[in-house]
Amino acid sequence: MTLKSIYVDNLSKDVGEEDLYQEFKVYGEVGSVNIIKNKVDGQSRVFALVAMTNNADAEAAIKELNGKNLKGSKLNVKEAETEH
C-alpha cells in the first residue's frame, strides 16, 4: 500500500495530532499524522505531515481543507514534495 503524503502548515499551536486526524478522516482512511516538533523544547513547529491511504481521498482532503480555519489559523494544505 502506498501512502499519499500531505503537507499541512500554518497550524495553531493549539492544534494536536488528534485534531488533524479528525479533520482528515472525514475524507478517507488516515495512515498517520505527525506534527513536527522543535527538538529543543518539544513545541509544535506549526506544520505537519499527514499520510492517507487513497490518492483520491487525499486529493479531496487537500481541496477541501486548504484554507480552512482550524483553532484560529487558516490551514495551508498541499501534496508533500518528495525527495528524488
Image (cartoon, rainbow, N blue to C red):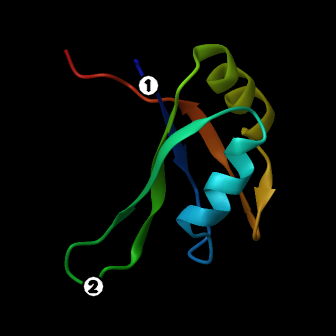
What residue sits right under mark 1 in the picture?
A: 3
Helix, strand or loop at disc 2? Answer: loop
Type of amino acid at the residue the image marks with label 2: Asp
Horizontal side of residue 20 vs 43, given as left or right: right
Q: Earlier in the sequence, mark 2 or mark 1?
A: 1
Quarter-of-image position of residue 18: bottom right
Which x, y percent locates residue 5?
A: 45, 30
User: Which quadrant: the C terminus?
Assistant: top left
Quarter-of-image position of residue 40: bottom left
Neighbours of disc 1 within 10 Å: few (<14), some (14-19), many (20+): some
Quarter-of-image position of residue 62: top right
Which x, y percent locates residue 31?
A: 49, 39
User: Which quadrant: the N terminus?
Assistant: top left
Type of amino acid at the residue the image marks with label 1: Leu
Horizontal side of residue 65 vs 79, given as left or right: right
Q: Which mark is residue 41?
A: 2
Separation (CA) of disc 2 from disc 1? 30 Å
Tell us which disc is closer to us: 2 or 1.
Answer: 1
The residue sitting at 61% across, 70% down in the picture is: 15
Rendered view: 67 above or below 6: below
Which x, y percent locates residue 46?
A: 49, 63
Q: How many marks?
A: 2
Mark 2 near mark 1, Cβ–Cβ under 8 Å?
Answer: no
Which x, y percent locates residue 64?
A: 80, 33
The residue sitting at 23% across, 22% down in the picture is: 83
Of residues 73 and 5, the one drawn nearer to the viewer in this rendering? 5
Rendered view: 28 above or below 24: above
Of residues 39 and 1, the one drawn nearer to the viewer in this rendering? 1
Horizontal side of residue 60 vs 31, given as left or right: right
The residue sitting at 75% across, 33% down in the picture is: 27
Q: Which mark is residue 27?
A: none
The residue sitting at 57% across, 40% down in the picture is: 30
